[in-house]
Structure formats: C-alpha cells, structure tokens
Image (cartoon, grey):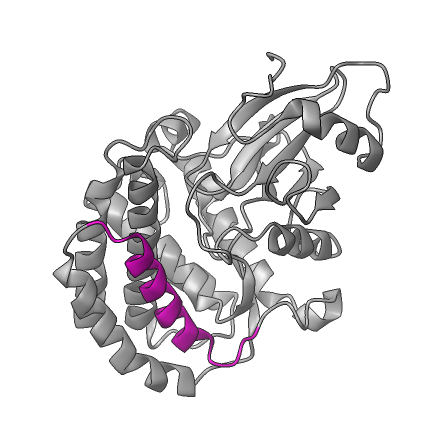
Amino acid sequence: MNAALPGLPGLDLTALTPWFREHVPGVAADVEIAARLVSGGKSNLTYELTDGTTSWIVRRPPLGHVLATAHDMGREYTVMTALRATTVPVPITYAICPDDAVLGAPFYVMEWVEGTPYRWASELAPLGAGRVRALSEQLVDVLAALHKVQPATIGLAEFGQPDGFLTRQVRRWDKQMHAYRTRALPAADELLRRLAATVENVERGGMPPRIVHGDFRLDNVLVHSDAAGDTIRAVIDWEMATLGDPLTDLALMLVYGRMAGFGMVSDVTDVAIAPGYLSEDEIIVRYDAASDRDLSHIGFYVGLAAYKLAAIVEGIHYRHLHGQTVGDGFTGIGRAVEPLLATGLDALDLR
C-alpha cells in the first residue's frame, strides 16, 4: 500500500491523521498511516487506512454536485451501529466526523472486513453452480432477516419517516432525475406519470415499516470463503438506508437481475446471469417464504426500482461528464439509463 499524499482525491491524509489518532482506538502511535482508494465514487468514496498492523475503512461523500440527503454519513453510521445488536452482519463502527472541518465533508471510520464484493458473473463462475446457488440463497435470507428487525428494538424508531414512504420515493427520485438530467428522456416522464398514478393505491394497503437498505445486491455485501464454504460477513453501503417499505429492496434486486439478463448493465453488475444464481421467481418465492409482506403489487415496486436506478445512473453520468468522478468504469454508464426506464415500464405492464 502506498502512503496517500494530500492530493489523494477526497482524502487529505495530513489533515486526517491527527483526528484519526484521537478518535479511533488502537492506532499505533509512532507509525505513519497509509491509505489507498478502494472505491472511486459511483456512490460514496471509500478508502482503506492502515498503520501496518490494523486496517480501517473511511467513507465520505463523492466529490462535486450531490444532493444533501443522498450521501448522508450519519445515516450509514447510525444504522450499522444499531444493527450490531442483530443477526444482520455489519462492520463495527468506530467514529464519525459529522461536519466539514477535517476533510471538507462529513466522514466516518469503520472496521475493515475481509471479504469479496462479487460484482461480475465471471467472478462467481469459478465457485461452481452449487456454491453460487447457495450464496444467492444466503443473500435473500440476509435481506429477509434485515426486514424482520423491529426498528424500535434497536433504537431506530425515529430513523426515518415511514408514513407516505412510497409517495416520497416517487417524488425523491423524480427530483434526483431532474437535478442530474443531461438529455431528453421521454420514457422517464411516462414511467414517472404511471408510478404517480398508482402509488396511492399501493400505499393504502401498506404494512408495518421496516429498515430499508436502499441498494441491496451481492456486491454490497462482503463474502468470506474458506473450506467451510462461503459466508456473507458484512452488508455495506448503507447510504440510502431508512425506515419504509422493504419491498423496495427486493424489487431493486430483481431490477439488477433483469438488466443483467438483457445484457444492459455491463457497467453496474451482472451476477444474476452466473450459473446457479437464483432466478427471479426463485428469489421471490424464497423471500416470500421468509416474509409477511404482500407481494401482489410487485410490478409497481419493480417499476419504482427501475426509475430509482435510472436516476442514480443518470447522476453518475452527469458527474462523469463534468469531471467529478474518481476512478475507472464510468465511461459507458449513461447507456444503461434508457434500458432501465424501459424495464420499469415493462414491469408495470406485466404485473
């Protein structure tokens, strides 16, 4: 690992080090801290820091133009800290800096967890179909376990505003789409119109709120593999977590799977096409067996998930066009927006 200089994008190690030594337990006193960029900003920026013996993770918002609520460090830190008391696997959290005083943006420090965030079918293929199936089953089981957690029992009763959650989701992702929109997208207008016309009916039959991750998928968990098998060690990337309707998490998993099946998200993830990975129907059946949620409006949720993901991808595309992304993998990401919108419209037609 190379020591990070003050010019490392988003991380001034000279400014960070005194704060880090004061607030994070167990840092070697007389050893220079080194850092590297782990994730370059499709979501929040992630860095690994080490004193040569122990490693930690630092998370901060991406550079440039972002919505204030879209990259909330306090939200990530709060939900992971609370979930340590449950069976949902999350990293240990150590300290948070809620203001801009040190790095020019809020950030927090958490445990470094050994594990692989599988993003591509080609990465899963060497495991074999049996292990891939078992891992995808485990992924669904972890999601169901998260959605069983009673927020009030772990201090998260006030974590979100679940009343009117779906209506606010439609409005929020419309706002984000328009904040970043770089081109004419008539399918976005049509999908939004149909979601807005349907949401009240879906929300009227809503069930008790639960914790929503906001972007639950295989490359947002860390998988540890050994002779005993493959184990999900930590769920990460909680930047969009809240209280609300957990079927939005399930639907987003399905959208990623649909898009991988159509070959449309080469810049995002395609694990769902790996041999052995659960089919969409198998995911729904397994989740339904472990859940008390009503899945009769799953088409609406898939349509909303497609619109949400299209808005997020359009935002990344915007930041890339304006030189505000860090790292590789952004060049063609804007191509996924229109197929995502078509997927959402198809979901409303089919279910």
- Magenta includes 174? yes
- Residue drawn at x 59%, y 12% is 2
| Residue 212 % position (x, y) | 53, 62
Q: Nearer the viewer, residue 39 or 265?
A: 39
In the displayed structure image, the side of residue 19 where residue 1 appears, left or right? left
**Quadrant in the picture for residue 124:** top left
- Residue drawn at x 66%, y 69% is 151
- Residue drawn at x 56%, y 75% is 161
| Number of numbered discs overlaid on the protein picture | 0
| Residue 72 % position (x, y) | 57, 53
Q: In this view, does 30 lie above or below 237?
A: above
- Magenta includes 300? no
In the displayed structure image, the side of residue 187 where residue 86 appears, left or right? right
- Residue drawn at x 33%, y 57% is 179
In the displayed structure image, the side of residue 254 where residue 48 appears, left or right? right
Q: Give the range drawn in magenta.
A: 161-182
Q: Which of 106 and 130 is in front in this view?
A: 106
**Quadrant in the picture for residue 203:** bottom left
Q: Nearer the viewer, residue 325 or 218?
A: 325
| Residue 320 % position (x, y) | 32, 36
Quarter placement of the N terminus = top right
| Residue 177 % position (x, y) | 30, 58
In the displayed structure image, the side of residue 91 where residue 256 appears, left or right? left
Quarter placement of the C terminus = bottom left
Q: Can residue 194 be seen in this view?
A: yes
